[in-house]
């Protein structure tokens, strides 16, 4: 643990985690058998009655795991296991309401299921909706309804959450809803920053706070330790094994499978107990007081390592071959080095000077790419760096860039994005303002033909 993390840009405020002792005193999650959720009108006849008759079954039992395949299958169960049984992005009633799907755009799989949530039986006769497992954010439904576990998710979670608040404000005292929202916003504050952008939430009306949630498109989300105003792109977990740093800011090192296990526990549960510098420690019961067992984390990590991309429909023909030559000529491979299409290095952002200690310990490439530095400086994950992302799987994911501000590859290579007055095609910002998407000028001045070839090549990766 001591060498797991890259220090924050201001290392005095790097997170301090709870002790191993305190950690192992938290009871591990009991993972019950779960059942698919169907979109309205797609449920098999009598399904709910059948569910009500099911007895609770403990589904994760390490004593029954023998082969590597057993562990991977069990890891899939952990990936899909809910960690919350109260509505976070949506309620059980929402998922049975066609208006919800129309208004939020939540995608439905080919077979009528909703892969972002599960029904769970923890007590006989009681069918609970569970969510906030890894699947809620890290599952993508392709336009043809194919479900791709691990890919950049496209559940419009923050929009769903915003809709829930809007409706709550109609039936509840709006002051109570505002207080709940303000509490949510407060977790992102960084009191040690002289000009913490997260503080602005304190002065916002309920309407403005809800609008901030609505501004966040699918594929981007205000996860714990990120920011409502600077939410990050949800990364693709397929081929995560090839990456040496986790998170856009490279906060967590990935030296071996145990680091991925530590990452999963920290980001899902333990962040709630972190202390930052001399700021008061949170109360130990402040979080949801649960953790994954070591066995669950191991199975989960093996499952993540086993994930495969969907078959790529983009032809590796003449155009793509030309694009590959453009890629080489434009020097993309210096950072997005084949065969991984990343050199696995950290790149310092504008306004951050890597300390000598970092240079000795981490793989740093001292060039400046010039993308929006705020996520790397003004969030709890802000190390002062962005890692070089892999370009694999670009054809099935988006929006792009660490902040998801760019919807497509065409937009990424469009020089118009550098200009004032540009309206980003992905995440726009909470107040919808037009603003440039600066930096990463590579490829912007290519001819239209070369650009089309380059993009065709990138879509084959
Ligand atoms: C609420 C949505 C949400 C949930 C739930 C969630 N994640 Fe994530 N995950 C994110 C976001 C957003 C990021 C990007 C954070 C960043 O870059 O700073 C991320 C990043 C990651 C990364 C880093 C990958 C990389 O290449 O940088 C891993 C690994 C990961 N998540 C695994 C998991 C696992 C395993 C679970 C379940 C135990 C999980 N996540 C649950 C939203 C979520
Ligand atoms: C000096 C290193 C460097 C070079 C050279 C470089 N890139 Fe990048 N690239 C990066 C970094 C760093 C990011 C992430 C920036 C961010 O998210 O703020 C990135 C992001 C991207 C993304 C978005 C990926 C995603 O998952 O969101 C694409 C696409 C991309 N680069 C393609 C290219 C191509 C094509 C070239 C050559 C024309 C190129 N890059 C040259 C460092 C580089």
Image (cartoon, grey):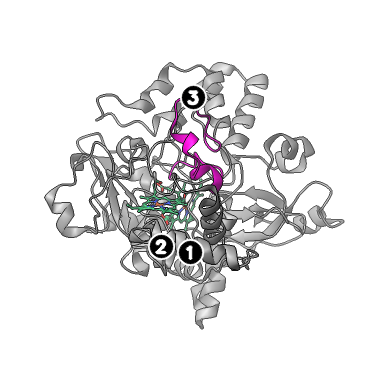
Q: Earlier in the sequence, mark 1 or mark 3?
A: 1
> Is 134 rendered above or below residue 317?
above
The answer to whether one can see residue 88 in this image is: no
Q: Nearer the viewer, residue 67 or 260?
A: 260
Q: Which residue is mark 1?
A: 324
Queried on whether the Cβ of the residue with tag 1 lies below 8 angstroms from ligand 2, the answer reads no
Q: In the displayed structure, would residue 177 be above or below residue 247?
A: above
Reading the image, the residue beneath label 2 is 328
| Mark 3: secondary structure | loop
Q: Position of residue 432 (x, y in %)?
A: 53, 25
Residue 209 appears in the picture as rendered: yes
Residue 110 placement: quadrant: bottom right
Q: Nearer the viewer, mark 2 or mark 3?
A: 2
Say which residue appears at 34% left-offset and 35% top-offset: 374
State if disc 1 and disc 2 touch (CB < 8 Å). Answer: yes
**Can you say which quadrant of the picture contains the N terminus?**
bottom left
How would you rate the neighbour count of disc 3 (Cα within 10 Å): few for under 14, some for 14-19, many for 20 or more?
few
**Image height of 239 relative to 445, above or below:** below
Q: Which residue is mark 3?
A: 421
Magenta range: 402-427
**Callout 2: SS:** helix
Secondary structure at numbered mark 1:
helix
The picture places residue 130, in percent across and down from the top left corner, at: 61, 50
Give the alpha-carbon distance from disc 2 to disc 3, as whole Å.
Answer: 32 Å
Check the image and name the residue furthest to the left: 356
Q: Residue at x 54, y 31 (%)?
A: 213
Badge number at residue 26: none
**Residue at (52% x, 36% y) in the render:** 427
Q: List x then y, in percent, for residue 444.
A: 44, 44
């Amino acid at each position: 643990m001591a060498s797991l993390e890259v220090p924050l840009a201001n290392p005095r405020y790097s997170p301090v985690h709870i002790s191993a002792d305190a950690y192992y005193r938290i009871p591990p999650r009991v993972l019950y058998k779960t059942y698919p959720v169907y979109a309205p009108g797609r449920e098999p006849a009598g399904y709910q009655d059948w569910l009500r008759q099911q007895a609770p079954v403990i589904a994760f039992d390490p004593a029954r795991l023998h082969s590597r395949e057993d562990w991977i299958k069990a890891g899939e169960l952990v990936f899909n296991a809910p960690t919350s049984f109260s509505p976070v992005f949506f309620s059980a009633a929402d998922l049975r309401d066609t208006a919800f799907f129309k208004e939020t755009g939540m995608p439905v799989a080919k077979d009528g299921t909703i892969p972002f949530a599960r029904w769970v039986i923890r007590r006989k006769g009681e069918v609970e909706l569970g969510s906030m497992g890894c699947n809620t954010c890290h599952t993508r439904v392709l336009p043809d309804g194919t479900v791709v576990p691990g890919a950049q998710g496209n559940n419009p979670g923050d929009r769903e959450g915003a809709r829930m608040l809007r409706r709550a404000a109609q039936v509840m005292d709006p002051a109570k809803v505002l207080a709940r929202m303000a509490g949510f916003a407060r977790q992102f504050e960084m009191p040690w920053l002289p000009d913490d952008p997260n503080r602005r939430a304190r002065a916002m009306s309920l309407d403005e706070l809800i609008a901030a949630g609505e501004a966040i498109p699918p594929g981007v989300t205000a996860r714990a330790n990120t920011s409502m105003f600077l939410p990050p792109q949800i990364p693709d977990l397929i081929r995560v094994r090839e990456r040496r740093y986790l998170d856009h800011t490279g906060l967590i090192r990935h030296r071996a499978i145990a680091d991925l296990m530590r990452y999963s526990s920290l980001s899902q549960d333990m962040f709630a107990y972190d202390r930052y510098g001399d700021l008061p420690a949170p109360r130990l019961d402040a979080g949801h007081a649960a953790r994954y067992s070591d066995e669950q984390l191991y199975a989960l990590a093996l499952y993540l390592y086993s994930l495969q991309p969907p078959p790529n429909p983009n032809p590796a023909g003449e155009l793509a071959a030309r694009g590959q030559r453009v890629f080489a000529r434009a020097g993309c491979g210096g950072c997005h080095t084949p065969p991984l299409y990343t050199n696995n290095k950290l790149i310092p952002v504008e306004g951050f000077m890597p300390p000598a200690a970092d240079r000795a310990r981490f793989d740093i490439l001292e060039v400046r790419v010039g993308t929006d530095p705020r996520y790397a400086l003004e969030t709890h994950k802000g190390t002062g760096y962005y890692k070089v992302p892999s370009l694999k799987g670009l054809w099935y994911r988006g929006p792009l860039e660490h902040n998801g501000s760019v919807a497509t590859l065409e937009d990424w290579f469009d020089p118009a994005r550098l200009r004032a007055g540009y309206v980003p095609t992905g995440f726009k910002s909470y107040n919808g303002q037009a603003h440039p998407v600066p930096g990463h000028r590579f490829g912007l001045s290519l001819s239209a033909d070369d650009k089309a070839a380059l993009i065709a090549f990138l879509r084959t990766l």
